[in-house]
Amino acid sequence: MYTLPKMKYSYDYFEPYFDTLTMKIHHTKHHQNYVNNLNNALLNTKISKSSLKHLLQNLHKISKDKLNVIRNNAGGHFNHTFFWKILKKNCKLSGELKKQIIKTFGNVDNFKKCFENKAIEHFGSGWIWLVKNDNNLSIINTNNQDNPIMSKEITGVFGNPIIALDLWEHSYYLKYKNNRLDYVKSFWKLLNWEKANCIYLKY
Ligand code: MN
């Protein structure tokens, strides 16, 4: 059975960028629901529960009647678990990731601008990612709870996630209302660049 991971910080830690109530609902209601729905969907099936990553990378083997519910909820569980891990205050971008961002986007400000533009362009619910493929960085969007580690035949994209930001309205609407751009800009104050650099070095 999958379980809701503990949040490393209290819900008010993320103030004033992500508000306390949003963080609490996001973790205890939204994320918990993905975990519950995933466990329910896997009940009485022979689908391997060995790892979430393995499950996401083998969606093509899942029967049609179970595919959508597992895709959405395993995706939701993975994406939120990843997202919580890369949130921390007062972090600075440095190291190899900084070098590669500058090489790819010219400078860090331009990278942020590209990321913000792509986040605004995305229609409806989904996620925005910085991914690494071989040695290349790119910014991609996925719909709903899809992510870049699901196979390319399922989502049309592939990459190893370095950074993720939730673009569902449930992640910002209480504080930012329809203003997605301000929410994305606030993310820069909460991004754990040190963790992102560690993840970058792993792939
Ligand atoms: Mn969410």
Image (spheres, grey):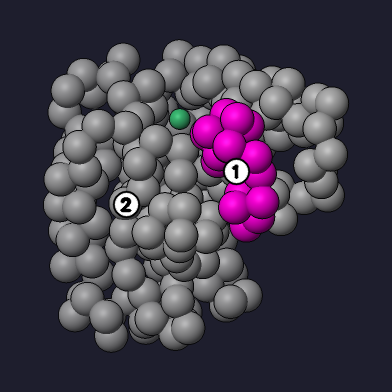
Q: Please say if 21 is above or below 183.
A: above
Among the 4 quarters of the image, the one containing residue 71: top right
Magenta stretch: dominant secondary structure: helix
Q: Earlier in the sequence, mark 1 or mark 2?
A: 1
Q: Which mark is residue 91?
A: none
Q: Residue at x 58, y 37 (%)?
A: 64
Q: Quadrant of the C terminus?
A: bottom right
The x, y position of residue 133, in whole percent, is 45, 76
Q: Secondary structure at mark 2?
A: strand
Look at the image and give the residue range highlighted in magenta: 57-76
Label 2, on which residue?
141
* 26 to the left or right of 9: left
Q: Can residue 46 be seen from the camera position used here?
A: yes
**Label 2 neighbourhood size at 10 Å, few (<14), some (14-19), many (20+)?**
many
Q: Which mark is residue 78?
A: 1
Q: Residue at x 22, y 76 (%)?
A: 105
